[in-house]
Amino acid sequence: MDPATPWFAASIVALYIALLAYAAYSDIRRLEVGNPVVAGIMILFFPAAWISGLPLESVVWHAGTGLAVLIAGFVLFSIGLMGGADGKLLAATALWCGTDEIMRLIIYVALAGGILAGIVLAARVLMRSPSLGRRIPWLAEGRWRDAPIPYCAAIAAGAALTFPHTPLMPRFLADMTGY
């Protein structure tokens, strides 16, 4: 095994998690996630698939899963049920999951979304306190009463929880540990 492989594998995992964390932070802070973050998550999948030895057929299935979720996200966005960033981030994370783990991703995102909704509802009550409201601008500006829930945070949490179950993880562990 090439000595650089464990570092490359670890770097990919760290960058994927960092991009997910930044997407969550950005959505919580400003209710938006930039396209470069989502594109970075999508692009990072391909070297991850290569280094983990994922067969081309599996890569195609992963891409198909991401595309199907992207189309569903566009439909949900067009009828006002999902934000644009939410649909794009969900599609990018679905690319990493493929058909094997897409249901686990959706379940984890739904659970994280329920927790997030509870937190946001509690925050809306607590934001009546002026000192606390200044820390999160979109809540402090009075938009908090009608503001959407920053669901990219739930998507990022669901994706991070799903990643260890994806077909990539055992291969990454083997690359990083040498076994």
Image: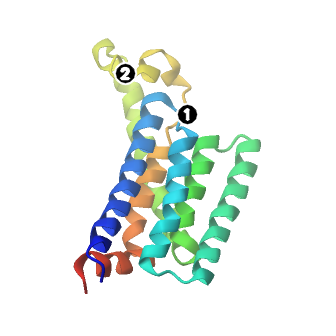
Pick the front one: 113 or 91: 91
Callout 1 crowding tier (Cα within 10 Å): few <14, some 14–19, many ≥20: few
Based on the displayed image, in which of its 4 quarters is residue 24 positioned? top left
Pick the front one: 121 or 113: 113
Amino acid at circle 2: Met
> Residue 165's spot in the image, x, y percent?
40, 74
Q: Residue 148 bears which disc, if any?
A: 1
> Residue 117's spot in the image, x, y percent?
45, 42
Q: Is residue 156 above or below residue 22?
A: below
Residue 16 lies left or right of residue 39; in this view the side is left
Please tell me whether mark 1 sits on a helix, a strand or a loop: loop
Residue shown at the point (56%, 72%) measured from the top left: 98
Q: Are marks 1 and 2 in contact (CB under 8 Å)?
A: no
Q: Residue furthest bottom?
A: 179
Based on the displayed image, in which of its 4 quarters is residue 164 positioned? bottom left
Q: Is residue 100 above or below residue 119?
A: below
Q: Is residue 39 above or below residue 129?
A: below
Residue 70 lies left or right of residue 152; in this view the side is right
Which quadrant of the figure contains the N terminus? bottom left
Which quadrant of the figure contains the C terminus? bottom left
Q: Residue furthest left?
A: 177
Residue shown at the point (59%, 42%) measured from the top left: 85
Please tell me whether mark 2 sits on a helix, a strand or a loop: loop
| Residue bearing mark 2 | 127
> Residue 101's spot in the image, x, y percent?
51, 73
Callout 2 crowding tier (Cα within 10 Å): few <14, some 14–19, many ≥20: many
> Residue 95's spot in the image, x, y percent?
57, 65
C-alpha distance separating marks 1 and 2: 15 Å
Q: Is residue 157 above or below residue 167?
A: above
